[in-house]
Amino acid sequence: MAGQSKIIANNDADASHTQGTTFRNLAPELQQMIFTEALCKPHVHFVTAQRRDDKTHNKWTITILPVSKGHDRSGYRWLQTLSTISHASSRAVRLATLEKDCLPFPGLRNHMDTSTDLVCIDFNRPKHKPEYGHWNAKNQIRASPSHPSFNPEAVASKVGKVHKLAFTYHPRHASCSTRRNVFRCLPQKSKHRDWKICPEELVGLLDCFQNLEAVYIILLPGQKKEAKMRANHYTKNFFALSAAEREACGFEIFHDSKCPYIEVDSDPNSKLLTRTVHLGPNSQHEEAYKPELLDEIFEILHDARKQYLEQASHTRGRHMSLEKRSRVSFKVLLHTNRKNADI
Ligand SMILES: [Zn+2]
């Protein structure tokens, strides 16, 4: 997103006077085109959540909240910044958000394009988050029938316009066998104790989204050298493809205010997930070289999709039909660090 920082710089009083003047001297239509280019749609919008208890009915739900402005790289924050730069930028933002809608939290005007944009519920943002109960109805009963149960209707009433939904996945997130995890397993389930999202529990939340089209897990590589190298390798391979090739493969890209999020090929034998090893002057071979945690994330999504389809048989009012559920895609996105990329 080199374009964004350049435009901000041009608006900065300390930035090169010549550069700023040159840009301002461009025809308004041309300025607007440049701003439209810098919008980099579709966007990722980050929200966080907080547990809310209803003691009268012995139920709990979640309130969806914005991420604090200083730490938020959501697309809508970027649009707000961009729209204040000039008349041309404000017009570019207005034209790009004709199909606008607001994120599901009150008291804040924000714009997203529900047909293309992604909403990421980042449960790991708040430092002192209260413990969540089980999301999946069958696990609530098995865990303890007397504990407050999750109220999916309360969430469903707010998120009807969200079509694309994401969750983050980081090597340092708590595993789903611990109480600190938001999507934690029932204690007796140990098959996937090291995963960071229990697929069965994830499905309990997905059931609230009546117009869901796609679910994404965003892999955040973390700070370890090898993990970063593997993630960078995939990113390099991905952007070595032309835009036409990426489109032919159906790969998606989303943007926050700084970086792109790129789809990870679900084919385990994909050339994008390999590297060439040179054994000698005339000898080389291809070997798998994938981002860390990738295999387990695909397993989580595979299991979650299976259970999501099975859950269709428990159809009650708000639930989506099997036919609609089978069209929901489950994908992995990689958070890249391509600040200076020209894409
Ligand atoms: Zn589990």
Image: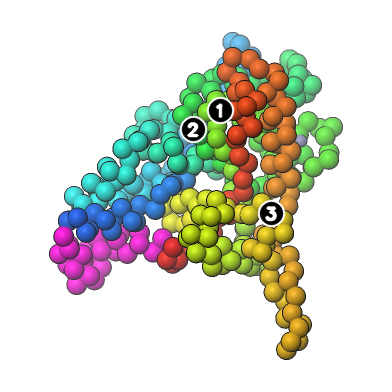
**Left or right: 319 with respect to 106?**
right
Q: Main secondary structure of the magenta part?
A: helix
Q: Residues within 10 Å of mark 2 (few under 14, many from 20)?
A: many
Q: Residues within 10 Å of mark 1 (few under 14, many from 20)?
A: many
**Label 1 vs label 3: CA separation?**
27 Å
Magenta residues (range)? 1-27
Residue at disc 2, secondary structure: loop
Q: Are marks 2 and 3 in contact (CB under 8 Å)?
A: no
18 part of magenta stretch: yes
**Label 2 vs label 3: CA separation?**
27 Å
The picture quadrant for ligand 1 comes to: top right
The quarter of the rendered structure image containing the C terminus is: bottom left
Residue 10 in picture, x, y percent from top left: 25, 64
Q: Earlier in the sequence, mark 2 or mark 1?
A: 2
**Which amino acid type is marked by label 1?**
Phe
**Which amino acid type is marked by label 3?**
Asp
Q: Which residue is mark 3?
A: 267
Q: Which residue is mark 1?
A: 209
Q: Which residue is mark 2?
A: 162
Q: Residue visible at 82% across and 34% down?
A: 189
**Left or right: 323 with respect to 75?**
right
The quarter of the rendered structure image containing the N terminus is: bottom left
Residue at disc 3, secondary structure: loop
Residue at disc 1, secondary structure: loop
Of 177 and 311, nearer the camera is 311
Residue 30 in picture, x, y percent from top left: 22, 59
Of 88 and 10, nearer the camera is 88
Relative to 4, is 164 above or below?
above
